[in-house]
């Protein structure tokens, strides 16, 4: 499915374009965003533009399984994330999301994540949506609980960060589970 656009009361998810590279790199340069993420290096803007171009080409194919999208608030890039189908039969997907810190604390993370669940079940007709989080990432875990996901278990030493292995918790929701009203 391409292009995907989903709007909530305060924010929207949309396809990324190569023109978003500067705004995204600018946003991703904030180390606070990766406090709980695996070690990774941020590419320069040109490399990132090339990466976006490749992603867009792959997204336009009928076999699309990765929905890497941008979050906008009043038309301005405010975050990113998306959904990646993981099962061989493409009935399950993992979601992920991040918001620029200026938008934290007002319910937007919950809105963004619940729109991804709507995309998975209502439009892509998937059966299961899951997400992983660092056990100390209380804001993200709360977001997952608020969108109706349930704790399923802890993956041991799943993520390498700051020279150490860290566990990650898995949360999931099925198409048959209740989705909380927004
Ligand atoms: C995770 C993230 C998207 C949350 O965004 P947000 O807009 O602040 O989320 P919301 O306001 O919708 O909800 C956050 C919930 O977590 C709670 N919360 C926030 N910080 C918390 C903390 N340190 N401890 C416990 N709960 C916390 C809030 O109170 C709220 O719950 P409530 O409505 O029951 O009070 C944002 O913090 C972010 O982008 N973080 C960096 C990237 C990241 O960690 N992504 C997730 C990867 S798994």
Image (tube, rainbow, N blue to C red):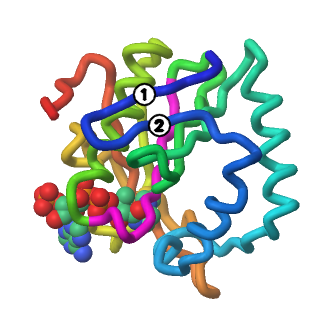
Residue 102 is covered by the magenta coloring = yes
Q: Regarding mark 1 in the picture, which secondary structure is present there?
A: strand
- Residue drawn at the location 60% of the way across and 27% of the way down: 87
Q: Regarding mark 2 in the picture, which secondary structure is present there?
A: strand
Disc 1 target residue: 6
Q: In which quarter of the image is the N terminus?
A: top right
Q: Determine which quarter of the picture holds residue 115.
A: top left
Q: In this view, does 59 lie to the left or right of 103?
A: right
- Residue drawn at the location 39% of the way across and 70% of the way down: 101
Q: Is residue 162 left or right of residue 7?
A: right
Is the residue marked by circle 1 packed among few (<14), some (14-19), or many (20+) residues within 10 Å? some
Query: Decide: marks 2, 1 in contact (CB < 8 A)?
Result: yes
Q: Determine which quarter of the picture holds residue 41.
A: bottom right
Q: What stretch is highlighted in magenta?
A: 92-104
Q: Determine which quarter of the picture holds residue 83.
A: top right
- Residue drawn at the location 49% of the way across and 51% of the way down: 76
In the rendered structure, find residue 67 and report the number of the disc placed on it. none
Disc 2 target residue: 13
Residue 136 is covered by the magenta coloring = no
Could you tell me how far apart the alpha carbons at marks 2 and 1 are, in whole angstroms?
5 Å
Residue 140 appearing in the image = no
């Amino acid at each position: 499915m391409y292009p995907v656009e989903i709007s909530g009361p305060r924010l929207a998810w949309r396809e990324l374009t190569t023109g978003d590279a500067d705004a995204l790199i600018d946003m991703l340069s904030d180390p606070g965003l990766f406090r709980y993420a695996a070690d990774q290096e941020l590419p320069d803007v040109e490399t990132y533009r090339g990466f976006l171009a490749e992603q867009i080409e792959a997204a336009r194919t009928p076999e699309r399984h990765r929905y890497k999208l941008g979050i906008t608030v009043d038309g301005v890039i405010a975050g990113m994330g998306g959904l990646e189908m993981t099962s061989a039969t493409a009935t399950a997907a993992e979601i992920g999301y991040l918001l620029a810190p200026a938008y934290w604390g007002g319910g937007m993370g919950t809105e963004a994540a619940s729109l991804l669940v709507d995309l998975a079940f209502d439009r892509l007709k998937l059966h299961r949506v899951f997400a992983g989080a660092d056990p100390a990432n209380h804001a993200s875990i709360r977001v997952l609980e608020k969108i109706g996901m349930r704790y399923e278990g802890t993956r041991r030493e799943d993520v390498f960060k700051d020279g150490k292995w860290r566990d990650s918790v898995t949360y999931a929701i099925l198409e048959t589970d209740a989705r909380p009203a927004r």
